[in-house]
Image (spheres, rainbow, N blue to C red):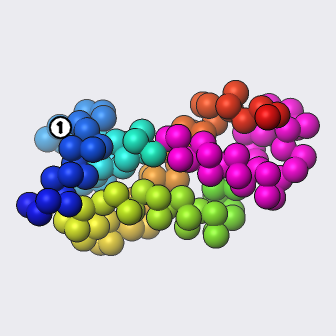
Amino acid sequence: MNERAIFLKELRGETIGTVGLSSSSDEVFQNQVLRPILKLQNDLFIASFKNYITKYKNDFYSQSTEKKLAQIENAIQKDIKYRNALKGMVIGLFTIEEYLIYIKNSSSLNKRMMGMLVERLKSQIQLFEQP
């Protein structure tokens, strides 16, 4: 393993979630790679979404909580440019080996990644109040 891979794995920390013999390869990748990266990058995702609100959703702060939650989901699922930027924040912390695994099943792994990110931002909705 090269220095970059060692550094990234140490930076991200341990597996989050359970990985067992019956776990699918996508589930193993999710718990060993995606969850630790999403946790590590949380503050960046928060800052990124605050910037997204400022640039594109000026009425966000006046919305009800339900509408705010819907806008978080809509931004990540429908705004391809923003979605790709978020994916880049995650993929940039893959090792080469992990990237090779990712590209074999990127569609399924992207769904998992974005789903977890949507839930992560929704669970922190209180951070998106009027500055």
Q: Can residue 101 be spotted in the picture? A: no
Q: Residue furthest left?
A: 1
Q: Is residue 105 left or right of residue 101?
A: right
Q: Name the image quarter holding residue 36.
A: top left
Q: Is 67 positioned to the left or the right of 127 in the image?
A: right
Choose between 15 and 46: the one closer to the eye. 46
Residue at 8% x, 61% y is 1
Residue 31, image x, y percentages: 30, 42
Residue position marked by numbered label 1 in the rendering: 20
Q: Which residues are magenta?
A: 42-71
Placement of 112 over or under 78, stated as above or below: above
Q: How many residues crowd around disc 1 within 10 Å: few (fewer than 14), some, or many (20 or more)?
A: few
Residue at x-position 71% and y-position 52%: 51
> Vertically, is 127 above or below 87?
above
Q: Secondary structure at mark 1?
A: loop
Three-letter code, disc 1: Gly
Q: Is residue 38 magenta?
A: no
Q: Residue at x 29, y 43 (%)?
A: 12
| Closer to the camera in the image, 66 or 41 | 41
Q: Residue 41, image x and y in percent?
A: 45, 45
Q: Nearer the viewer, residue 101 or 47?
A: 47
- Position of residue 42 measured from the top left corner of the image (x, y, whole percent): 50, 41
> Which secondary structure dominates the residues rendered in magenta?
helix
Q: Residue at the location (63% across, 36% down)?
A: 122
Visible residue check, residue 100: yes
Q: Position of residue 105 (x, y in %)?
A: 34, 67
Q: Quadrant of residue 119?
A: top right
Residue 50 is a magenta residue:
yes
